[in-house]
Amino acid sequence: MWQAIRNHPRAILGAVLAHLVFVAILVVSFRFSESPIGTFGEPPDIIEAVAVDEKVIQAELDKLKAAEQRKKDEARKANEARLKEQRRKEELKKQRAAEAKKRKQQEAAEKKRLAALEAKRKQEAEHKRKEQERKAKEKQDALQAEIARQEAALEKQLEADRQARQAEARRQASLSEINKYRRLIKEEVTRHWNIPATAHDDLLCEVKVRLIPSGDVVDVHIIKSSGDAAFDRSVEKAVYRAAPLSVPPVESGLFDEFREVVFQFEPRNRV
C-alpha cells in the first residue's frame, strides 16, 4: 500500500480527501438529525465535529505530504546516489581509459626504446664487423706488403748475389788473365836474362816496369836492389831485350793493370 502511495502520491491524496469529505458530510448529517435544535446561530456540536474532521484531514494531509516529502527525499537521495554512482563509474571509466592510454604510451615507449636499443646494437655490431674487416684487411695488406717486401729484398739479394758472383767470376777471370800475362812477361824477360857468373842464389832484385799498350818498355826502375850492381843491371837489360812484352789488348780493359808492373827476380827461380 505504501509502495502505491509512494508511486502515486497525488492520486492517493485526492482519493483520501474525497473520502474524508464524504465521511465528514455523513457525520455532520447524522448528528444534525439526532440533536435538538438549539438557539439560532449556536450549533456547538456541528462546529466541533467539523473541527475534528478537519484535523483528521489535515493530519492525513500532513502524513501524505510527509510521505511525499520522504519519497522526494528518497528519490533525491536515490538520484544523488545514482548520479554519484554514475560519476564514480564515469570516473572509473576515465581512470581505466587513462590507465589504458598510459599503458599504451608506456608500451609504445618501451617498444621505441627496445627498437632504439636493437638499432644501436645492430649499428654497433655493423661497426664492429666493419672495424674487424678493416683491421683484417689492414693485417692482410700489411702481410702482403711484408711478403712483397721480403720477396723484393730476396730478389734484390739474389740479384746482388748473382751480380756479385758474376763480378767475382769476372774478377777471377780477370785475375786469371792478368796472372797469365804476368807469367808470360816474366817468362819473356827471364828468357832474355843473362845472370852474371858472380850471382848467387840468395840475391833478389825487384823492378817496376812501365809499359805502353804496344808492349814496349818505357822505363825500368830498380825499387829493391839485390846489392849486386851487375845482377841488377842484368835484370834491367833483360827487360829491355824482351820488349815488346806480351800485354792484354786495351779493349779487354786489363791493360791498366800493366801500365806499371812490379817483378821480383831471383836466380833460383829462373825458369
Image (cartoon, rainbow, N blue to C red):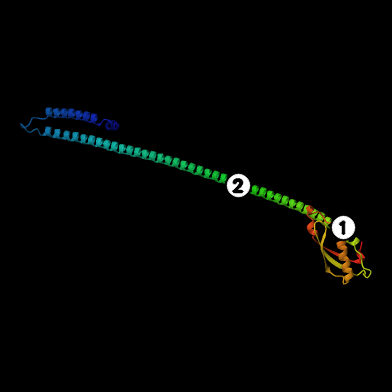
Judged from this view, the residue extending furthest toward the left is 40
Give the quarter of the figure containing the N terminus.
top left
Residue 10 in view here = yes
Q: Position of residue 111 (x, y in %)?
A: 49, 41
Provide the residue designation for mark 2.
134
Closest to the observer: 175 or 57? 175
Give the quarter of the figure containing the C terminus.
bottom right
Mark 1 is on which residue type?
Answer: Leu
Numbered-mark total: 2
Provide the residue designation for mark 1.
184
Kind of element beneath mark 2: helix
Mark 2 and mark 1 in contact? Answer it, CB < 8 Å.
no
Q: Position of residue 206 (x, y in %)?
A: 85, 67
Closest to the observer: 228 or 142? 228
User: Is 83 located above or below residue 186 in the figure?
Assistant: above
Kind of element beneath mark 1: helix
Closest to the observer: 167 or 247? 247
User: Is 87 located above or below residue 181 in the figure?
Assistant: above
The residue carrying pointer 2 sits among few (fewer than 14), some (14 to 19) or many (20 or more) residues within 10 Å by Cα, namely few
Mark 2 is on which residue type?
Answer: Arg
User: Is 219 located above or below residue 115 in the figure?
Assistant: below
* Residue occupying image coordinates x 68% and y 48%: 148
